Image: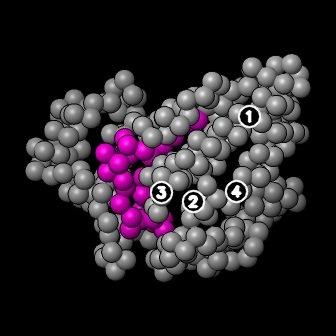
């Protein structure tokens, strides 16, 4: 988003004209700092201005709800930021006599805490909490030219359960297969009732994992897997998130000590590979 430009928009246009998607992910700067997004509202508005001025009439904005430390003010921020982008689009399109063509589509997913991330210890919001936040946001974006869509809460709940679960979930997956669960990534094939029956048949509850809050000292189901990033780094980042402190991109601001770079392994920018290839050498 921060690197978007008119030149890039025109390069995309050479292929085909379609909608553009920007991912501020949170509606307030406080929340974007918590998730270490590294993007400001000014970045978004500048990118949106470039897009609208380059002839795009439709922009898609991607957000998440249910993030750690989220408040209703952050939910309100999603609606407010989306309305500001729409107003910007109308102003730019209005200069071409097409103000009514400006559209902003808002896509909202529910946050799923994942292993080996600073938020691995945090629970996902309950299904009831997520549904309440969806309803709250839906009421706040009832504006002509602004539409909102949500990822299925039941699907997000299951994603969290399996992302944070342990070996006890293996029989659940097998049971769901026996019950007829297939191609669950397709909304028309997803049958959450069968999945909940599979959990029930195994005398388990999906909330045991999706909504579990782990202590920082707890042994986690995935601790035996070494992803390169140290637990100490993740813990430090979790504390920084709680304090609203960001960590700069190590490719641009120096090593942040995550533990990935060891021996001959280091993070490299894509441009470095291009330079190495043109010179006929270089390590990946």
Q: Name the element at disc 4.
A: loop
Comes first in the chain, label 2 or label 4 = 2
CB-based contact (under 8 Å), mark 4 and mark 1 = no
Observer-nearest of 71 and 229: 71
Instruction: State how far apart marks 2 and 3 are (Cα).
Output: 9 Å
Compare residues 57 and 16 and report the one nearer the observer.
57
Q: Give residue 80's position: percent from left, percent from top.
A: 62, 43
Can you identify the residue that label 3 sits on? Answer: 71
Query: Which class describes the residues within 10 Å of circle 1: few (<14), some (14-19), or many (20+)?
Result: some
Instruction: Report the quarter where the C terminus lies.
Output: bottom right
Considering the numbered disc 3 on the image, is that residue within a helix, a strand or a loop? loop
Which residues are drawn in magenta?
A: 106-133
Alpha carbons under labels 2 and 1: distance apart: 23 Å
Work out whether mark 2 precedes mark 1 in sequence or the reverse, and give the earlier one.
2
Q: Earlier in the sequence, mark 2 or mark 3?
A: 2
Q: Quote the CA–CA distance across marks 2 and 4.
A: 11 Å
Q: CA distance from mark 3 to mark 1?
A: 25 Å
Badge nearest the viewer, 4 or 3 = 3
Q: How is the image coloured?
A: one colour
Q: Residue at x 10, y 50 (%)?
A: 203
**Residue 126 painted magenta:** yes
- Which element is circle 2 on? helix
Residue 26, given in percent of the width and then of the height, sits at 58, 51
């Amino acid at each position: 988003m921060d690197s978007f430009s008119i030149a890039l928009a025109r390069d995309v246009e050479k292929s085909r004209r379609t909608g553009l998607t920007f991912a501020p992910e949170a509606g307030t700067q406080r929340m974007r700092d918590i998730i270490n997004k590294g993007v400001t509202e000014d970045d978004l508005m500048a990118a949106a201005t470039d897009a609208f001025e380059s002839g795009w009439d439709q922009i898609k904005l991607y957000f998440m709800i249910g993030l750690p430390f989220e408040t209703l003010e952050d939910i309100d921020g999603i609606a407010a930021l989306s309305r500001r982008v729409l107003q910007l689009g109308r102003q730019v399109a209005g200069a071409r006599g097409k103000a009514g063509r400006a559209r902003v589509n808002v896509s909202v997913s529910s946050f799923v805490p994942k292993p080996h991330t600073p938020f691995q210890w945090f629970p996902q919001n309950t299904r009831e909490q997520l549904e309440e936040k969806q309803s709250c946001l839906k009421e706040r974006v009832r504006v002509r030219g602004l539409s909102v869509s949500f990822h299925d809460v039941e699907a997000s709940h299951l994603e969290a359960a399996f992302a944070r679960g342990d070996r006890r979930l293996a029989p659940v997956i097998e049971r769901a297969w026996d019950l007829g669960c297939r191609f669950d990534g397709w909304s028309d094939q997803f049958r959450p009732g069968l999945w909940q029956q599979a959990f029930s048949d195994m005398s388990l509850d999906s909330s045991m994992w999706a909504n579990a809050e782990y202590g920082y000292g707890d042994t986690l189901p995935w601790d035996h897997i070494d992803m390169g990033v140290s637990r100490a780094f993740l813990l430090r980042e979790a504390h920084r998130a709680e304090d609203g402190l960001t960590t700069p991109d190590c490719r641009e601001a120096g090593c942040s000590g995550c533990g990935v770079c060891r021996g001959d392994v280091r993070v490299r920018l894509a441009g470095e590979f291009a330079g190495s290839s043109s010179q006929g050498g270089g390590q990946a």
